[in-house]
Image (tube, rainbow, N blue to C red):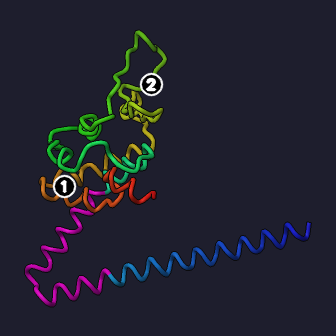
Amino acid sequence: MMFDFLNARNKDYDQRVVNATLDNLTLINKKTEELIEVIVKKLNPSEGTKQIESVDKILAGSRFYKQILRMFQLTYFENSIEEIIEIEPKDKIWYEYLSQFKGFSLIKSDSAFDPDSNYKTILTLNYSSSYWSVETEDNILPIQVLKARDFFDSLVILNKNERKRALSSITYLNKDLSKRVKK
């Protein structure tokens, strides 16, 4: 009983230390960003603001790809970066865009086959048991799907070159690189 109490107390203390460290890292990161922003703007005011906005835009676009990798528990996409940037995201819903990637497909609901089904569309990874309902009758979707949808809005505004930079910022994207890292 006493041992359990001491163990719980130690875990509590460790959690507080970790949380405090994370808070400090967050603060340091924010301060570093602000310092770099001030320096860049001082060195070249007109170009500095454009560069910062460009980097922010590309990082926002890369969130979509990261979210999809997390959702499907992937370390890379089957497509090469060159193949992915050729797929135009404009005028598409995020899951229609993704269904054009190797391994992904959409399944539309067949009410005759499953009359109790609530989904209209499912995005699935063909070689896995991973799938997500991306369109439902009642419009209630998992938070991961909502995040992907929101992050896609940041991706759509990127041109090919910016999409390439967004994909390149994800270090574990390339399957060949992923294999080398595991060794």
Picture quadrant where residue 181 is located = bottom left
- Tell me what residue is drawn at x 31 percent, y 53 percent: 174
- The residue singled out by tag 2 in the image is 118
Magenta stretch, overall SS: helix
Q: Secondary structure at mark 1?
A: helix
Residue range of the region highlighted in magenta in the rendering? 33-62
Measuring from the top left, give residue 161's x and y in whole percent.
Answer: 13, 57
- The residue singled out by tag 1 in the image is 163
Q: Of the residues shown, which amino acid type is indicated by label 2?
A: Asn
Label 2: how many residues lie within 10 Å, few (<14), some (14-19) or many (20+)?
some
- Tell me what residue is drawn at x 7 percent, y 81 percent: 46
Q: Quadrant of the N terminus?
A: bottom right
Q: Of the residues shown, which amino acid type is indicated by label 1?
A: Arg
Horizontally, residue 51 falls left or right of residue 136, namely left
- Tell me what residue is drawn at x 45 percent, y 58 percent: 183
Horizontally, residue 103 falls left or right of residue 44, namely right
In the image, residue 102 above or below residue 33: above
Picture quadrant where residue 107 is located = top left
Horizontally, residue 14 falls left or right of residue 114, namely right
Disc number placed over residue 50 in the picture, else none: none
Choose mark 1 or mark 2, whichever is in front.
1
